[in-house]
Image (cartoon, coloured by chain):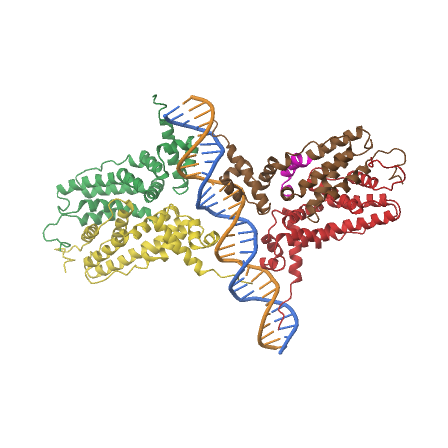
Chain colours: A brown, B red, C yellow, D green, E orange, F blue
Amino acid sequence: MSSGRKRSEASRLAILEATRFLLAAVGYERLTIEGIAGRAGVGKQTVYRWWGSKSAVVAEAALSGGLSQQVEPLPDTGHIANDLREWSRAWVARLTSPEGSGLVLALTAATVDNQEVADRLYRHFTEPHETSLLQRLASAQRAGQIDSDADLPTVASTLVGSLLYRVLARQRPPTADDANALVALVLKGCAPQHEGADAVRR
Amino acid sequence: MSSGRKRSEASRLAILEATRFLLAAVGYERLTIEGIAGRAGVGKQTVYRWWGSKSAVVAEAALSGGLSQQVEPLPDTGHIANDLREWSRAWVARLTSPEGSGLVLALTAATVDNQEVADRLYRHFTEPHETSLLQRLASAQRAGQIDSDADLPTVASTLVGSLLYRVLARQRPPTADDANALVALVLKGCAPQHEGADAVRR
Amino acid sequence: MSSGRKRSEASRLAILEATRFLLAAVGYERLTIEGIAGRAGVGKQTVYRWWGSKSAVVAEAALSGGLSQQVEPLPDTGHIANDLREWSRAWVARLTSPEGSGLVLALTAATVDNQEVADRLYRHFTEPHETSLLQRLASAQRAGQIDSDADLPTVASTLVGSLLYRVLARQRPPTADDANALVALVLKGCAPQHEGADAVRR
Amino acid sequence: MSSGRKRSEASRLAILEATRFLLAAVGYERLTIEGIAGRAGVGKQTVYRWWGSKSAVVAEAALSGGLSQQVEPLPDTGHIANDLREWSRAWVARLTSPEGSGLVLALTAATVDNQEVADRLYRHFTEPHETSLLQRLASAQRAGQIDSDADLPTVASTLVGSLLYRVLARQRPPTADDANALVALVLKGCAPQHEGADAVRR
DNA sequence: GGCTAAACGAGACGGTACGTCTCGTCTTGGG
DNA sequence: CCCAAGACGAGACGTACCGTCTCGTTTAGCC
């Protein structure tokens, strides 16, 4: 019962790096496995051995590259509005940077192409942001800055999705002002109900 | 100065129909011009003569097919909450139907692939919904049901984008309850300010 | 009822020429369809569209190139021994020339690989030589220079095959002397049986 | 300092056996080193360590398998015609058996591919037959059954090569009758010259 | 009503990339 | 030091489509 040669970590990294480079250079549609293998100095089989589809390589390349590490757990200064504004500012900046928007488009294409990849990307890329938001919102809720009846998951996914949508639409990319407007809208939407703040009442 | 043969309407329709069929059958990634031409009983050149790219055919096929006609201009019963709930219910139903979600995915892929197509799709597919929402919201604003300072474009695009995002994420598809929660959040977020409902202010 | 574009004669010829060149340059085993297509300036599909296997291209390339045209119909000077010596000299010269022997090896490999190609090569390459020999032998038989009971097909195929075998064995290639010895052996083997067996003498 | 593990005879035999099996099953062209190693339950490296090329393995497999052992040294009953007929009958039977003809084709392909293998195969496979024939012919010559001037090597190689050629041509395989006709032709061709039967001499 | 010219179906063309197979080499760990 | 296992870089396989380019064959207007 022998074991054979070990998987080459150098090749793995070269493939992911080449994928990231080419994704930025030519976009998802024009990205090819042959191109990746060529630029990584690797046989095509080595790509197929471990990934089996363009979308899978792209997913792992994106997840192991920049962009996802920085899921910094949202500051908690005690002031939810400031914290959300800060978060949204950073999120928008990242989404609208050249690499960021390109990556969002590529990952979206991969998501569209492949359910399994969609799951993986969601789990490692989008969900952490929602989770992180959720925790901060819950903390604000406990602090009484947010209504105790508020539907926090809806709030979180609205914040994340609404901005992503603006990037994907490829029309005017979202600005810091858009982000602030969104935060304002949503925060007021879940503000605590003391006396007369019964907006939706009727 | 003769004019030559006219463009064949039959071929045009056959191509769009074939595109719609194949899009549903195999998805955007595996859709090919050759496949479209073959199924439409048409030469490839006839496709290239009038469209020139996969994404362009897909865009026109989608826009000329179902889904987009029904941009009914949002009911105005005078009760904004009810009207938005009704709109969101219909919107979610359409997005989560098998054809609907498939089409959203395909159009997203086309949008990602091609800026020009992105513009066209936005203009004919998404924008009308936002516009229609916007008009209803403006009407509600005039009726005092919505705060006069509310940022209506942000409200509209949040409603549209937030639900689209949930479809694109391909995780749990949005439900009528999700839609209601979103409407409630957003409506409260732009409710009129009576006196001290200044939750976010401080 | 349309017809589509016609087959390109230029491509056909370029492919056959490239095949001949590469066969001489690298041999049958190292000949590739990609190499042929590349050197011919042609898409691979154009090769596969019309031939479908390496051996088939090689067969047609060989048959349409040199070597086979020259099945000159064997001189008939009335002197069978001289005529056969002349034929065998030319046959050996052709088989042992660099291109000749290379081609024989390649065609043999193709023959081994593919029965259908074997048939075609036999019919167009070897058989004509045997037929041509057979006719000359029959003429000699009528002239009384060859025994009337002689088994001419055996004689012809022995002459052809015996020399080919020496080329294929890739040991000492056959010489003019070998050819003469073979002719002498075979001619004596079918000499007329009268009294003094002076058939060929005059 | 130590001599390490000894070469595994079991692996060697398994490789040769697998080669023979696969040669019969799929032919030379579709035979692969990986296939051999796989079927032999052996690492590829073990094949490369000891042979280094497909043709080399095939050569050794063929030589160490059936077909070659039986180079029985030709009977000598004192009657050369009978002995040659007996030999040719056996030779044809072996060449035209399913395994025999397949092996001839495979070995021919190997011969074509590789000069070194060609030498080895000639030396161990074809030459012994010619040598054995040569000895019997020399004996007949001494017995006066064959002309003293006869070119025995030509006779022997004609007998061997002419029949091999018929197998390689892959048209009608040679029969016992063909063999007899060949023997008759050749034997008459080197029959002793009684008086003035010097047909070919001048 | 014949002429001309563009659009049509068909399908071959030079290409690119696919995903698979095999090559010959290299690495690992067990015997 | 040999071996089975098996990953590796390389590159050919045969297929699918790309977008372009002929081919006849309709099918309009226009004379």
Q: Quadrant of residue A111?
A: top right
Q: How would you classify the magenta stretch by its main secondary structure?
A: helix
Question: Which residue lies at the image location 60% right of the left edge and 53% below the top edge?
Answer: B33
Q: Quadrant of the C terminus of chain C?
A: bottom left
Residue B126 shown left or right of residue A100 in the figure? right
Let me know if residue A160 is in the magenta part: no
Question: Which residue lies at the image location 80% right of the left edge and 48% below the top edge?
Answer: B133
Q: Position of residue C102 (x, y in %)?
A: 32, 50
Q: Position of residue C74 (x, y in %)?
A: 25, 60
Q: Position of residue E15 (x, y in %)?
A: 50, 52
Say how many tags the image has. 0
Residue C55 shown left or right of residue B65 in the figure? left
Task: In the rendered view, tell whether residue B65 sits above or below residue D129.
Answer: below
Residue D57 shown left or right of residue A177 in the figure? left
Q: Quadrant of residue A92?
A: top right
Q: Quadrant of the N terminus of chain C?
A: bottom right
Q: Position of residue C144 (x, y in %)?
A: 19, 60
Asked if residue A1 shows in the view, the reply is no
Q: Quadrant of residue D103?
A: top left
Write the start and end of the magenta stretch as one range: A110-127
Depth check: give the residue in front, D20 or C63. C63
Depth check: give the residue in front, A82 or B112. A82
Residue reaching furthest to the left: D195
Asked if residue D154 shows in the view, the reply is yes
Depth check: give the residue in front, F20 or E21. F20
